[in-house]
Image (cartoon, rainbow, N blue to C red):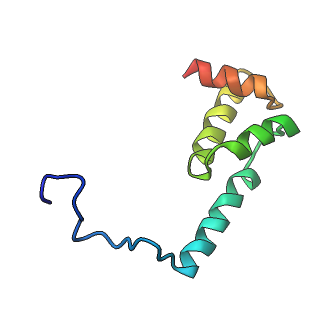
């Protein structure tokens, strides 16, 4: 609003140090959902890699990796498949 990105935004609802309990519950729910949404089998090692990815990006990573796998007739996700999918984009 002021042109200075370091100044306070009058329309921002964020309050430093204040996190609503309902928001925390939503974030906890979101954090667990992507691993439950897998459509292909993933190795334990690949799941470990996926768990280290920030949860806000996991859904996108899952779609990209599984899309790559399906287009290459791959039916089991490993860390190597994840790497190949990443390199193909």
Q: Position of residue 36 (x, y in %)?
A: 76, 55
Q: Is residue 30 left or right of residue 38?
A: left
Image vertical order of residue 3 relative to residue 44, above or below: below
Q: Please identify the residue farthest to the bottom as the structure is shown.
A: 21
Residue under the image location 60 percent in, 66 percent down:
27
| Residue 89 position by quadrant | top right
Between residues 58 and 64, which one lies in front from this camera angle?
58
| Residue 30 position by quadrant | bottom right
Q: Please identify the residue farthest to the right as the structure is shown.
A: 44
Between residues 63 and 71, which one lies in front from this camera angle?
63
Image vertical order of residue 45 relative to residue 86, above or below: below
Image vertical order of residue 56 relative to residue 73, above or below: below
Q: Position of residue 58 (x, y in %)?
A: 63, 46
Residue under the image location 79 percent in, 35 percent down:
46
| Residue 42 position by quadrant | top right
Q: Position of residue 14 (x, y in %)?
A: 38, 70
Residue under the image location 39 percent in, 74 percent down:
15
Query: In the picture, which quadrant includes the N terminus?
Result: bottom left
């Amino acid at each position: 609003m002021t042109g200075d990105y370091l100044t306070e935004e009058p329309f921002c609802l964020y309050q430093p140090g204040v996190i609503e309990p309902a928001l925390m519950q939503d974030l906890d729910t979101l954090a667990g959902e992507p691993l439950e949404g897998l459509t292909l089998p993933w190795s334990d090692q690949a799941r470990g890699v996926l768990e280290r990815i920030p949860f806000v990006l996991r859904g996108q990573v899952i779609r990209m990796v599984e899309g790559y796998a399906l287009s290459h007739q791959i039916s089991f996700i490993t860390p190597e498949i994840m790497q190949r999918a990443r390199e193909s984009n």
